[in-house]
Image: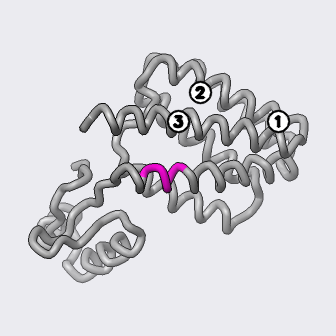
Amino acid sequence: QQLMPGDRLREVELAEMIGLSRTPIREALARLESEGLVVHDSTLGIMVAELDYSMVTELYFMREVLEGTAARLAAQHASSVEISLLEDMCEQYANSVGDDAQLAINNRQFHEMLYNCSHNRYLIKMLKTLHDTLTLLGNTTLTDPKRVKDTIKEHEAVVAGIRKHDPDAAEKALRAHIYASQKMRIRRLISNK
């Protein structure tokens, strides 16, 4: 069962659904609350967090900074094998146009590979936490056909900077990619109100 922002979370129901006792569920909920993924409402109890406009802009700001840094470090440290894998992932992404679920999977794999190419375990950990928070936004922006086409070019530009071992170009391309994604996300957020 997929939980959506605003859904109430009850320990007993979660314990039954997952097949655990209430103690690990309570501990997991406390951890999720500390990470901002769930919130405690005084009248409704524990709920899946909902991100408002400010939270979304803050999240994308951090994403731009951290992923831009990952691209910069990848341009400095990625091996030829890692660069080849990034290029393969760009091709796989382009070949999955029309299959929204596969696009989302391929996009996530591309970004995770990019993080690994940074060769900085602390940055990778921070980016994984950031991406966990991104799941609160719901559907990917990749359901828009124009966004998909633009993303192909944006990913290729990032990889081109990494391949040339040009940290400035890689970071600039990645920041432009996140900026475009944020613009689409904000547009959706405003239109859903």
Instruction: Give the residue drawn at x 18%, y 71%.
Output: 41
Give me the C-alpha separation between circle 1 and circle 2. Answer: 15 Å
Magenta span: 56-60
Image spot of residue 107 (x, y percent): 55, 36
Do labels 2 and 3 touch, CB within 8 Å? yes
Mark 1 vs mark 3: in front: 3
Kind of residue at badge 3:
Ser
Asked if 33 appears above or below 48 in the picture, the reply is: below
Residue 49 picture quarter: bottom left
x then y, percent, for residue 4: 24, 50
Which dot marks residue 161?
1
Q: Amino acid at mark 2?
A: Thr
Q: Which residue is mark 3?
A: 181
Q: Is residue 58 magenta?
A: yes
Report crowding for label 2: few under 14, some 14 to 19, many 20 or more residues within 10 A (C-alpha).
many
N-terminal of the pair, mark 2 or mark 3, is: 2
Q: Position of residue 174 (x, y in %)?
A: 69, 40
Left or right, 73 with reference to 193: right
Q: Main secondary structure of the magenta part?
A: helix
Q: Is residue 150 above or below residue 164?
A: above
Task: Name the spot of residue 169 as percent of width and height, x first.
Answer: 82, 38
Please tell me whether mark 2 sits on a helix, a strand or a loop: helix
Between marks 2 and 3, how big is the CA–CA gap?
9 Å
**In the displayed structure image, the side of residue 170 where residue 66 appears, left or right:** left
Rendered view: 185 above or below 73: above
| Mark with earlier residue (1, 3) | 1
Label 1 secondary element? helix
- The residue identified by callout 2 is 151
Amino acid type at image mark 1 = Gly
User: Does 4 sit above or below residue 31?
Assistant: above
Give the number of callouts: 3
Residue lying at 42% horizontally and 70% vertically, measured from the top left: 35
